[in-house]
Amino acid sequence: MYEERSFGDKLWLVVKGLAMGAANKVPGVSGGVVAFVAGFYEEFIYSLQKVNRKALGLLLDGRFKSCFQYINGRFLGLLILGMIISYFSVSKVLDYLLVHYELFVWSAFFGMIIGSIYYLSKDFGEWNRRYIAWLLMGVIAGVSISFLEPAKENSHLLFVFFCGIIGVSGMTLPGLSGSFILILLGNYVLLLVDSVNALYDTIADLFVADFSFLSNTERVELLKILAVFALGSLTGLVSLSHLLGYVLKHYKKTTYAVIIGFISGSLGVVWPWKEKIYDLNAAGNIQFDANGREIIRGYDRYWPSEFSLETGMAILFIFVGIILVLSLDWYQKLRTHKHG
């Protein structure tokens, strides 16, 4: 039985959903890390595991209240509400900041991941050779993924469904960025920018009773793609939670060692000082996709050659990111002490 939450706790849970939603949209950052650091990761996984055959039976029998309580519906509902709000607010702000203040945004995320590594490691316990080996495997996997070359965009619905299953991994696996995986699969812009913007525009049209979008074949196609992506995400969320629940139950410390290693290895993805590598044609000109955007093939990472004001600000934002993550830990301790 889950404890009853106060209004403040419910509001804070929506805010956590906002943070998860924003993190999942940013390449290199994992919403699962937010859940882990904010102290609701295990309840999140356990609640998702309850979306099973028994829950379906309760739903089909018309026992909606029992089904809602069984799957911890209030918790999941508030969290998902925060994620949905995030996609139409916080994530929009992040899109703007990445365009105009890219160095500082990546610096803050770099700091947040460093803070997350510390948070995950501090209560790990004794490190033996076996756990160090798993840690190194996680580091190698994270580094390897960081340097993979992105694929081309693919809007086939079956592939979009597969992207949904893989893309949602960032919510359940701390350190594995679903957005970065979507970049590697070539569908990040299609699924997390174009489709979401199409839904946003459609909702705005519906508010003013404008149904002209129904004759817009491109908009309808994007909405169809988003629906299939959402279905794939739901499938992945439930199936991965069952798999992860089993792994955490039987191989908890081993799993944590791999996660810590993976997060450490993925630091290269969010390294602040980098230049975009564009896809060039035979004439050496930048290639553009069907929507007129420059096609980015990867990043050229470098160390800052001189200490400027911009470099100093970037370093400051790294520390801001670290403090932000650790403050969530401090909040959890304060809350535990208050209720204890």
Image (spheres, grey):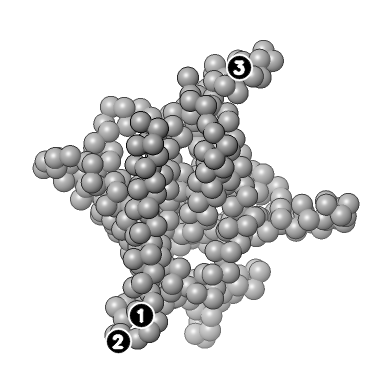
**Furthest residue in direction front, as rendered:** 338
What is the secondary structure assignment of the residue under circle 3?
A: helix
**Furthest residue in direction left, as rendered:** 129
- Pinpoint residue 68: horizontal percent, then vertical percent: 60, 23
Q: Is residue 286 visible?
A: yes
Q: Which residue is mark 2?
A: 306
Residues tagged 1 and 2 counted as in contact (Cβ below 8 A) = yes
Kindly identify the amino acid type of the residue bearing the numbered disc 1. Thr
Reply above or below: 208 against 336: below
CA distance separating discs 1 and 3: 55 Å
Kindly identify the amino acid type of the residue bearing the numbered disc 2. Glu
Looking at the image, tell me whether mark 3 or mark 2 is earlier in sequence order. 3
- Pinpoint residue 234: horizontal percent, then vertical percent: 56, 37
Kindly identify the amino acid type of the residue bearing the numbered disc 3. Ser
Q: For residue 206, which numbered disc appears in the image?
A: none
**Relative side of 16 to 226, left or right:** left
- Pinpoint residue 49: horizontal percent, then vertical percent: 47, 27
Q: Which residue is mark 3?
A: 66
Q: Which residue is depicted at the point 37% across and 42% down? A: 334
**Callout 1 crowding tier (Cα within 10 Å): few <14, some 14–19, many ≥20:** some
Looking at the image, tell me whether mark 1 or mark 3 is earlier in sequence order. 3
CA distance separating discs 1 and 2: 8 Å
Q: Which residue is depicted at the point 36% across and 72% down? A: 316
**Relative side of 197 to 178, left or right:** right
Q: Which residue is mark 1?
A: 311
- Pick the quarter of the image with the C terminus: top left
What is the secondary structure assignment of the residue under circle 1?
A: helix
Q: Is residue 142 visible?
A: no
- Pinpoint residue 74: horizontal percent, then vertical percent: 58, 30
